[in-house]
Image: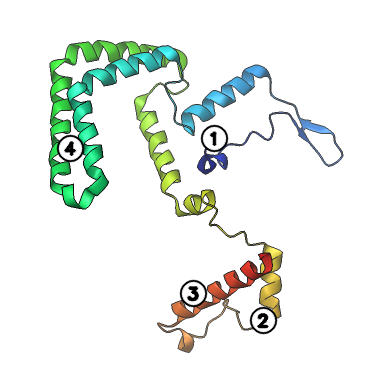
Amino acid sequence: MNLSSRKDYIEPNYINGVFDKNGQKVIRELTPKEIEFLNQFYEETIVTNFYHDPELKRLQKKKREIIEDSTVQEIKSEVKRLEENKEANRKRIRELKEVIRITKKQNEETFSDKLANLEKDIQELREELLLYPDTEDHKLFYNENNSRNSCIFNKKRITGKLSDLNIEEYEAFLSSHGDEYDCEYVPEEEYDESLEERCRDILEEIKDHFKDQKS
């Protein structure tokens, strides 16, 4: 049930054991305990879910409700409404976001003792339940997840816009055109500003060729 952008980073193929071409088992299957560990490892490092435990989730929600009180929620709703026409409301949106920032900061200062106690309870549960209880590790995993989500390759693949280029087809295409597309060596006198444009044209022609074959 993971997002397509994560599936290439999850390798569960060996869970039921690994067999050679003769059907002989070369790596045993994982035990239920090992599978549970692997699932939690991926949940924290790839899915970046550190609040799968109900009590952790409850305490984190309580903490968030203190910082983002009813005032913050109301302003957020107003910002969301204004963002339906961002261009016309750009200035007001910026002002309200600043009000949100200040209000959250004030709440953190006003309820600092209560929040500190909550964070202490949360951290104790992290230490007990998580493989990675350190929030600095969480930041690293969040950053990696954001990188996957903003990766051009991933974006194109999960939206079905990535062409699958079979190496045999590609080499056959180049061979059929003789030396026309031999880019391994370009004489220095031919290396000019138009080279990049020529390469783009070649790539477009190759893409069109394979599109026609599929259609």
- Identify the residue under disc 1: 2
Secondary structure under tag 4 reads: helix
Cα separation, mark 1 vs mark 2, equals 42 Å
Amino acid type indicated by mark 2: His
Residue with the most extreme bottom position:
189
Residue 210, labelled with which disc?
A: none
In contact (CB < 8 Å): disc 4 and disc 2: no
Residue 60 image offset from top left, x and y in percent:
33, 18
Residue with the most extreme right position:
22
Secondary structure under tag 2 reads: loop
Amino acid type indicated by mark 4: Lys
Marks 4 and 3, the one that precedes in the sequence: 4
User: Which quadrant of the view contains residue 28?
Assistant: top right
User: In the depicted view, which residue is nearer to us: 67 or 180?
Assistant: 67
Going by the image, does 56 lie left or right of 47?
left
- Identify the residue under disc 2: 177
Residue at image location 26% in from the left, 19% down from the top: 65
Residue 200, labelled with which disc?
A: 3
Disc 1: CA contacts within 10 A as few (<14), some (14-19) or many (>=20): few
Residue 97, labelled with which disc?
A: 4
Going by the image, does 47 lie left or right of 34?
left
Residue at image location 53% in from the left, 82% down from the top: 186
